[in-house]
Amino acid sequence: MKVEFSKDMKKKIIVYASSLICAILAFTLINRIDEVARFFSGVMRILFPFLLGFAIAFILNQPVMVFEQKLLAKTRLNNTSKRVIAEAVVFIVAFGLLILVIGMIVPSLIDSIKTFMTNIQEYSDTLYKYMMSLAKTMNISPAMIEDWFKDLDILPSISQALKSYIPKIADFSFGFIKEIMNFIIAIAAAFYILLDKESLIRGVKKLNYSIFNKETANYLTLFSHDAKEVFEQYIVGNLLDALIVGIVCYFGVLIFKMPYAPMIGFIVGITNVIPVFGPFLGAIPVIIILLLINPWQALIFAVFILVLQQVDGNVLKPVILGDKLGISGFWILFSVTVGGALFGILGMFLGVPVFALIYASLKDLAQINLERKNIEINDDAGIIQ
């Protein structure tokens, strides 16, 4: 006996079967979450050099294009030769600058840390004297200050922190050769990505239009262009902004004759790449360090960093980054918090552009559907009839 299914019945079967498969997959993932996490962790370790290569290619794409299209445009070289020469020059200059910066910063940074650790006992005694003097001025019991200072336990805390990092340093030393190999693979991957960029983009575009209908494929193409612009401007701009802030902080600390200028400039510059919380993450440990050395210098630095961050937030960042994100301060705070909770420091850094793209996509999708339904939303809270 032949059974015929109507179109509605076929649709229901597909929906029910898909729902059942999704439920089974969800249950399997939840039930074996540790195994799934280990699997994805292993996949990420394997793909890490290529992901790093993609990131390097993404950052160096604009300099390569400028060099190729501006400086080599009038030469008689073919396109492949122009691209290879442009890549070679940009890669050499970029990594030469990187090695130069590391050579300038790292020795000074190590010297600053060594000097600080050597003088930590002296700084602790100085802070104790300041606290006792402040207690006398404010008629606070010296015994209370002594108890507070013992509870603070500065020296053992720092020693314990250093001991906890020793195994990590050892692990890094053992894995150094592997990381060098990963970095070499990443450089090679970045070089080939930039060399074959047009063919790779063409292949992705063909796959996109072959899988989806024209309207959806067009939407995904526009989305990819927006993603490129947002990430390119945000990541490169943020790194440039952090470099400028770190250099300004370094010279500011030198002008105010504070110690450990390389270490302080490095801390402030690195943490400045994190939106919203970055300035605080960088300023707080520096203020604590200066508080151990000279409380007045800690106060001066707090005022200096407040002024610097105001100039950075209101002048420097708008000039460098522009206003491409298109989200309010609330959503920036939300994306940084959620990104940091899920993926740590990297999530705090990339959470803003990722959320900005999701926000823009949902906004465009909602606008398209509203236009299809001939609905116009105004600012009133009333119901649309």
Image (cartoon, rainbow, N blue to C red):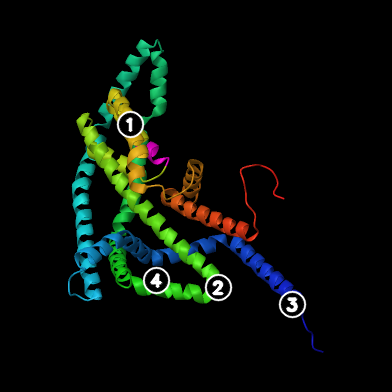
Q: Distance between the residues labelled 4 and 2?
A: 18 Å
Which numbered disc flags the more N-terminal residue, 3 or 2?
3
User: Where residue 368 appears, x then y in whole percent?
Assistant: 58, 59
Magenta stretch in the rendered image: 276-282
Using the rendered view, name the quadrant where residue 277 is placed. Answer: top left
Kindly identify which numbered label has been placed on residue 201: 4
In this image, 41 relative to 245: left or right? right
Kindly identify which numbered label has been placed on residue 307: 1
Question: Of circles 3 and 1, which is in front?
Answer: 3
Label 1: few (<14), some or many (≥20) within 10 Å? Answer: few
Which numbered disc flags the more N-terminal residue, 3 or 4?
3
Amino acid bearing label 4: Ile
Q: Which of 380 and 193 is in front in this view?
A: 380
**Compared to 313, does 181 lie above or below?**
below
Amino acid bearing label 2: Asn
- Residue 37 falls within the magenta-colored stretch: no
In this image, 232 relative to 92: left or right? right
- Placement of the N terminus among the 4 image quadrants: bottom right
User: Where residue 225 appears, x then y in whole percent?
Assistant: 42, 62
**Compared to 66, does 1 lie above or below?**
below
Amino acid bearing label 3: Lys
Kindly identify which numbered label has been placed on residue 207: none
Question: Of circles 1 and 2, which is in front?
Answer: 2
Which residue matches tag 2? 213
Amino acid bearing label 1: Val
Which numbered disc flags the more N-terminal residue, 4 or 2?
4
Q: Can residue 384 be seen in this view?
A: yes
**Compared to 134, does 121 lie above or below?**
below
Are discs 3 and 2 less than 8 Å apart at CB? no
User: Where residue 144 appears, x then y in whole percent?
Assistant: 42, 17
Which residue matches tag 3? 7
Q: How far apart are marks 1 and 2 (CA)?
A: 53 Å
